[in-house]
Amino acid sequence: MADGENTISFLPSRLNREATVFGGMTVSEFGISAAIGFVIGLMIGLLLWILTDWWLLIPALAMLLCILTVLIGKGIVAALKRGKPEAYLNRKIEEKFDEMLMGNKFIRREGTWSIRRQKGNRK
């Protein structure tokens, strides 16, 4: 076999991209949206259970708000991702979590970057 037969000459960038699952949302975005809705529904259900003494409100509201946040969240996620690089939203979420937990995973620098030529550097 020739050396060229063992290598892949063309590897599309879509091969390494996270798969879209629902409404333009990836698995991680879908999971985050569903988890946020579930937790909010759970808290509201617990509050209403305390007020009404009807425990079925807890799972009902948790699942209802889970579904609603996924349905509403797909439009919000699409708007946040529009015109941005592939993993922009994932990195932004990681950066916010790192900031909230006082981590040091990301390099933070306030200010602007400039790239310019200096006179006299021609060779």
Image (cartoon, helix red, strand yellow):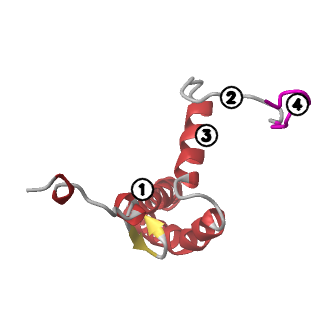
- Label 3 vs label 2: CA separation? 12 Å
Would you call the spot at circle 1 few (<14 residues within 10 Å), some (14-19), or many (20 or more)? some
| Residue 71 percent across, percent down from the top left | 51, 75
Question: Circle 3 sits in a helix, a strand or a loop, which is it?
Answer: helix
Query: Circle 2 is placed at which residue position?
Result: 108
| Residue 26 percent across, percent down from the top left | 43, 63
Query: Circle 1 is placed at which residue position?
Result: 28
Q: Give the mark nearer the N terminus: 4 vs 2.
A: 2
- Asked if the stretch drawn in magenta spans residue 117, the answer is yes
Marker disc for residue 96: 3
Nearest to the eye among marks 4 and 3: give it: 4
| Residue 40 percent across, percent down from the top left | 52, 56
Query: Circle 4 is placed at which residue position?
Result: 118
Amino acid carrying mark 3 in the image: Lys
Amino acid carrying mark 1 in the image: Ser
- Indicate left or right for 113 with 66 as reference: right
Q: Give the mark nearer the N terminus: 1 vs 4.
A: 1
Nearest to the eye among marks 3 and 2: give it: 2
Q: Main secondary structure of the magenta part?
A: loop
Question: Circle 1 sits in a helix, a strand or a loop, which is it?
Answer: helix
- Label 4 vs label 3: CA separation? 37 Å
Residue 77's quadrant in the figure?
bottom right
Residue name at image x 65 percent, y 69 percent: 79
